[in-house]
Amino acid sequence: MNYFAHTFETPMGSLLSVVDENNALVLLTFCEDQPQAELIFAKEFRKACVAWDAGRNALVEAQLGEYFLGERQAFTLPLQAKGTEFQQRVWEALVNLPYGETATYGKIAAALGNPNASRAVGRANATNPIAIVVPCHRVIGAKGALTGYAFGLSRKERLLELERKSAG
């Protein structure tokens, strides 16, 4: 399979997007977090052909631009994240979290039918390869505190504030 990568600027930093031959988004990560980006990129694409192609990623860039302007609350991008069946279920639950709202790890675990799986939900959340579009930033701790975000709690707080401001 061939993949097509592109980097672009946003108000919160540079993003790296990668789409597959069908233009489905397989990776969206902040470039500044080099260890995270390189780890995901090396693991998922080490045996693949990856070309730089802004055109193939134009829809991703356009929709993220609208999101950061507060004009887009739902993405219509095809997604193709690689993960286990459980990870896929968690990521699907994340996509269904309403814009501008948050949920706890426990609430997501309960919605998936296993209220004791909050730690597993947290791990799946942490390995989400498609930042923002699969909104892992909307997941918070049981007591409402901002907890763990691969790209830093300050960025998580800024994303949530952007959504609250635009939703209201």
Image (cartoon, helix red, strand yellow):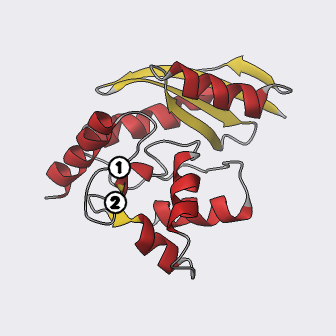
- Check the image and report above or below for 14 versus 141: above
Percent coordinates x, y for residue 13 in the rendering: 36, 23
Which residue is nearer to you in this view: 130 or 63? 130
Horizontal relation, residue 96 to residue 120: left or right: left
* Alpha-carbon span between mark 1 and mark 2: 6 Å
Counting residues from the N terminus, which is met first, the one under dot 1 or under dot 2?
Answer: 2
- Check the image and report above or below for 124 versus 13: below
Q: Which mark is residue 11?
A: none
Residue that carries the numbered disc 1 in the rendered image: 147
- The part of the image, by quadrant, that contains residue 114 is bottom right
Percent coordinates x, y for residue 63 in the rendering: 42, 40
- Residue at 32% x, 49% y is 72
- Residue at 50% x, 36% y is 60
User: Which quadrant is the N terminus positioned in?
Assistant: top right
Percent coordinates x, y for residue 104 in the rendering: 37, 66
Q: Callout 2, which amino acid?
A: Gly
- Of all residues, the one furthest to the bottom in this rendering is 113
- Check the image and report above or below for 81 versus 116: above
Q: Callout 1, which amino acid?
A: Thr
Residue that carries the numbered disc 2 in the rendered image: 141
Element at label 2? loop
- Residue at 25% x, 62% y is 144
Mark 2 burial class by Cα count in 10 Å: few <14, some 14-19, many 20+: some
Percent coordinates x, y for residue 28 in the rendering: 54, 35
Horizontal relation, residue 46 to residue 126: left or right: right
- The part of the image, by quadrant, that contains residue 43 is top right
Element at label 1? loop
User: Which quadrant is the C terminus positioned in?
Assistant: bottom left
- The part of the image, by quadrant, that contains residue 141 is bottom left
Mark 1 burial class by Cα count in 10 Å: few <14, some 14-19, many 20+: some
> CB atoms at circles 1 and 2 under 8 Å apart?
yes
